[in-house]
Image (cartoon, rainbow, N blue to C red):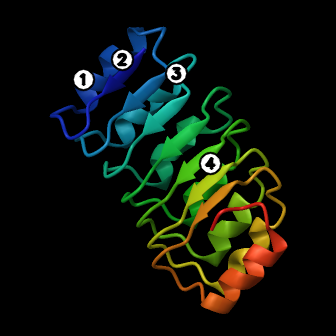
Amino acid sequence: MKLYFLGKKIDDEDVAKLAELKELHELCLAFTEISNSSMEIIAKIPGLLDLDLAGVRIDNEGLKPLANHSTLKRIVINETAITNAGLETVATIPNLECLELYRCFITDDGLRHIGKMKNLEKISLDSTRITDKGLPYLYPLTKLKRLQIWDTGVSDEGRKTLQSKMPAVSI
């Protein structure tokens, strides 16, 4: 089952009702009014594969209930207050294949955590604060197919070096 509430007037009270949906696999709460309070409930949805939290009022603390989530394959946390510290939690999600961090407060230190996510196939780091210095942390990601680094501190030379080290990756 898929539920999309993009931009709808959904808040923490409404999310409590989602815990009853045992067949929910995709959940889009982007640009709704949920906060950290909803994350305990969301983390308990069995079989959740895809979670879109773009533009919601969560921070690093709100991600903690997702630690070690066994079924989650994709998480979108674009335009949230997530920082490098939040990526420490995200790095514990063992089957994560897609991570979107557009306009989050991620720096080179955050790439250290991302480099530990061995199943990642796609990462969006557009409009983050990463630079050439952090790119070597991504080299161990052998399953990576697509990397988005538009509007960052990555130079043309850094991009070329990254491409030479990761030739199978579309950058």
Q: Is residue 23 above or below residue 144?
A: above
**Quadrant holding the C terminus:** bottom right
Q: Is residue 163 above or below residue 27?
A: below
Secondary structure under tag 1 reads helix
Upstream in the sequence, badge 4 or badge 3? 3
Q: Is residue 95 above or below residue 130?
A: above
The residue singled out by tag 2 in the image is 18
The residue singled out by tag 3 in the image is 44
**Quadrant holding the N terminus:** top left
The residue singled out by tag 1 in the image is 14
Secondary structure under tag 4 reads helix
Report the Cα–Cα distance between label 2 and label 1. Answer: 7 Å
Upstream in the sequence, badge 4 or badge 1? 1
Tell me which residue sits at (31%, 48%) in the image: 56
Upstream in the sequence, badge 2 or badge 4? 2
Marks 2 and 4: CB-CB under 8 Å? Answer: no
* Camera sees residue 133: no
Tell me which residue sits at (45%, 45%) in the image: 62
Which numbered tag is attached to residue 90?
Answer: 4
The image shows residue 113 at horizontal and vertical percentages of 70, 60
Residue type, label 4? Val
The image shows residue 122 at horizontal and vertical percentages of 62, 52
Towards the viewer: 84 or 141: 141
